[in-house]
């Protein structure tokens, strides 16, 4: 299914929203106004947006510690995520998560994992449930290049392949596992090659090319839905910022950073495409950017104005009890 | 009512719950053809979709149980030996146990993980004989069930399956062949309710799992000299403190027996919890028996030095009561 003009504009807006959102949050952390862990997804926006566009409402998405983009692209409000980072009761998790373990059950997004690769098995179980229930939902499991060296990844791909589960494993290969360059943590050239070890299709796509991501995801998701069976999709991106908010990446060659920032920034690339196709002009782009700037500014104010969670609620829902179902 | 083995009682519970609720399914390594046999025969009745042999992948077994449970299923995963649960530890501790809390009750993980533990010359040695349930008491968000006889095994497993939380269900290997009366009809035993296995006046012995049998035998042997009350908490989380406190207030003496190592273990936790309420009722310091802080050695001659035995329990009871 081809993407129409309106969809393209919407997708551009979503990518810009993610970028502005994370720029703003990063600044707040760096200014020392917020504490905690903050992993931004600068450079990976086309993956989040391309993937979500290819999914249906009933699909289930397991995100990770670098997950703001996934949630924003699925439709979670920036207000609730920022409020979560401020530990407020209006946050996605009412202040129990911070940036790393976001949740949005209304949008099919269970708790994200702060353990690298930690929820790949859990996502596989979600696909197992779909396979038993025959509910036609596809599960997406997001993780980075670093997670492809952990046992969870291998145990899960084997199980999903064996049981023909409807799941798409999406590796956002941002070329760094924390401060370690990918070449120093694994010898394989393409992460998607690992799919062959589990007799499942594996693809590598330019993760900075929004339309390419969308098309690749659409293909594997549709197949998973119709025929069952997993796939591994590697999206090659570059982590345009440090591992976390305070990290300025002294271990990375400046030249490498500059090259990716200028040539492979997914938002710049898509903007140029839209300008070229005359879907957008500079004036409209400016207006969009201003609107988003305002939206994020308001989201921060919403978070600041929100109430703190009440102390007496601190141990609620450690366990789910029967009355919670009523 | 008929007499059946502990392992058969477990199978009855699984079978009844699978009939009762289509969301219940079982999985684990070789569950249809090998191992201790709680799932044996279920595949003929329910098919391979709901009775799944898995690869040797404990993280994926436990993690996928978490994921299936998040999506409304009620998986009962078997870990062949509790020692292997450590491979899936992250999936229990960092994933399963945290979901409800992080999602403010909007998500739940109604799964059961069954695992055989313990020894008494089972011959498994250091990596196939451990008793690990104590470790999990330190993790908020999971419930711990540890039945000591066939009747409790059936009723508690049914409750565990119907519970909306991750439940770890520990079965002592020596118990599997023990026989007891088990009703054929449906019944459940609530989690968090201890069972007074024998009433007595002189000393309270809190024992778990296989240690209940030892303690009951000692109580019978000493019945002409000492009146021993034996309490089985049956679930460690939640823990029924009230039943134990009431008993200790009556006897003024407390011995806690559990097969896990004493260091940082359940014995100390139970004693602390009870002493906070009944310290002034005590006539003798509370005592605990567990394994030495030593791995389980293979040799039969060495193993009994490490684990709690009937003789050790008897000796300690006599020590407390005669002092």
Image: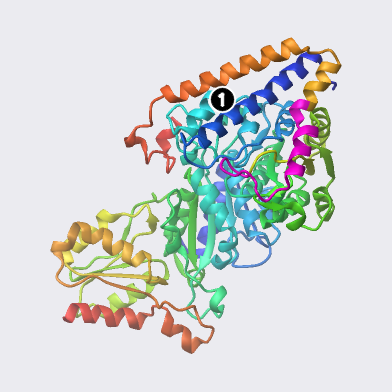
Corner quadrant of residue A173: top right
The magenta region covers A243-268
Left-right relation of A234 to A42: right
Please state the horizontal and vertical placement of residue B264, each as a whole percent of the image.
38, 66
- Give the residue at the far top of this rendering: A283
Residue closest to the eye, B250 or A225? A225
Q: Please report the residue visible at 62 percent of the width from the left and 40 percent of the height from the top.
A: A66
Camera-nearest residue between B45 and B26:
B26
Check residue B310 for magenta coloring. no
Residue highlighted by disc 1: A78
Name the one closer to the observer, A132 or A139: A139
On the question of residue A179 being in view, the answer is yes
Quadrant of the image containing the C terminus of chain B: bottom left
Left of A316 or right of it: where is B54?
right
The image position of residue B128, as x and y in percent, is: 56, 73
* Relative side of A76 to B130, left or right: right
Tell me which chain the residue with mark 1 is part of.
A
Which residue is pictured at 60% across the width and 19% down the height? A293
Q: Nearer the viewer, residue A301 or A309?
A: A301
């Amino acid at each position: 299914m081809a993407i129409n003009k309106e969809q393209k504009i919407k997708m551009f807006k979503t990518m810009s929203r993610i970028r502005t959102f994370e720029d703003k949050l990063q600044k707040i952390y760096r200014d020392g106004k917020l504490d905690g862990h903050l992993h931004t997804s600068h450079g990976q926006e086309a993956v989040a947006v391309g993937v979500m566009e290819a999914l249906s409402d009933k699909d289930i998405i397991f995100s990770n510690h670098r997950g703001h983009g996934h949630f924003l692209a699925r439709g979670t409000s920036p207000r609730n995520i920022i409020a979560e980072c401020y530990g407020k009761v209006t946050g996605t998790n009412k202040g129990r998560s911070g940036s790393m373990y976001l949740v949005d059950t209304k949008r099919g997004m269970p708790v994200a994992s702060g353990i690298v690769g930690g929820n790949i098995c859990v996502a596989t179980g979600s696909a197992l449930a779909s396979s038993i229930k025959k509910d036609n939902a596809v599960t997406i499991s997001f993780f980075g290049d670093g997670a492809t060296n952990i046992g969870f990844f291998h145990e899960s791909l084997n199980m999903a392949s064996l049981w023909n589960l409807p799941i798409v494993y999406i590796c956002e290969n941002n070329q760094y596992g924390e401060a370690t360059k990918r070449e120093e943590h694994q010898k394989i050239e393409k992460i998607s090659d690992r799919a062959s070890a589990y007799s499942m299709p594996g693809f590598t796509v330019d993760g900075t090319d929004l339309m390419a991501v969308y098309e690749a995801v659409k293909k594997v998701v549709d197949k998973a839905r119709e025929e069952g069976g997993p796939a591994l999709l590697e999206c090659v991106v570059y982590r345009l910022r440090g591992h976390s908010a305070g990290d300025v990446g002294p271990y990375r060659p400046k030249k490498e950073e500059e090259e990716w920032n200028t040539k492979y920034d997914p938002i710049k690339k898509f903007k140029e495409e839209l300008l070229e196709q005359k879907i957008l002009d500079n004036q409209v782009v400016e207006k969009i950017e201003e609107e988003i700037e305002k939206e994020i500014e308001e989201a921060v104010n919403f978070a600041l104005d929100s109430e703190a969670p009440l102390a007496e609620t601190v141990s609620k829902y450690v366990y789910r009890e029967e009355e919670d179902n009523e | 009512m008929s007499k059946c083995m502990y392992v058969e009682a477990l199978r009855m519970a699984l079978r009844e719950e699978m009939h009762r609720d289509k969301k219940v399914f079982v999985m684990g390594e070789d569950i249809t053809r090998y191992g201790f046999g709680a799932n044996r025969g279920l595949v003929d009745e329910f098919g391979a979709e709901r009775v799944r042999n898995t690869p040797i992948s404990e993280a994926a077994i436990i993690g996928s149980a978490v994921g299936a449970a998040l999506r409304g299923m009620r998986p009962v995963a078997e870990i062949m030996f509790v020692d292997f649960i450590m491979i899936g530890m992250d999936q229990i501790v960092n994933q399963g146990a945290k979901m409800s809390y992080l999602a403010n009750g909007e998500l739940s993980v109604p799964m059961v993980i069954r695992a055989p533990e313990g020894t008494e010359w089972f011959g498994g040695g250091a990596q196939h004989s451990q008793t690990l349930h104590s470790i999990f008491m330190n993790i908020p968000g999971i419930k711990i069930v540890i039945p000591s006889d066939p009747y409790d095994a059936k009723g508690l497993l049914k409750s565990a399956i119907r519970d909306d939380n991750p439940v770890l269900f520990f079965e002592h290997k020596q118990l599997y062949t023990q026989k007891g009366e088990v009703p054929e009809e449906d019944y459940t035993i609530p989690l968090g309710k201890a069972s007074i296995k024998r009433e007595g006046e002189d000393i309270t012995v809190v024992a778990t799992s296989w240690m209940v049998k030892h303690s009951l035998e000692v109580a019978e042997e000493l019945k002409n000299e000492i009146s021993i009350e034996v309490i089985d908490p049956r679930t460690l989380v939640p823990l029924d403190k009230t039943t134990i406190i009431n008993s200790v207030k009556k006897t003024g003496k407390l011995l806690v027996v559990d097969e896990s190592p004493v260091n940082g273990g359940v014995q100390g936790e139970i004693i602390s919890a009870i002493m906070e309420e009944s310290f002034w009722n005590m006539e003798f310091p509370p005592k605990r028996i567990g394994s030495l802080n030593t791995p389980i050695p293979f040799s039969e001659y060495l193993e009994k030095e490490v684990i709690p035995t009937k003789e050790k329990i008897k000796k300690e009871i006599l020590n407390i009561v005669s002092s």
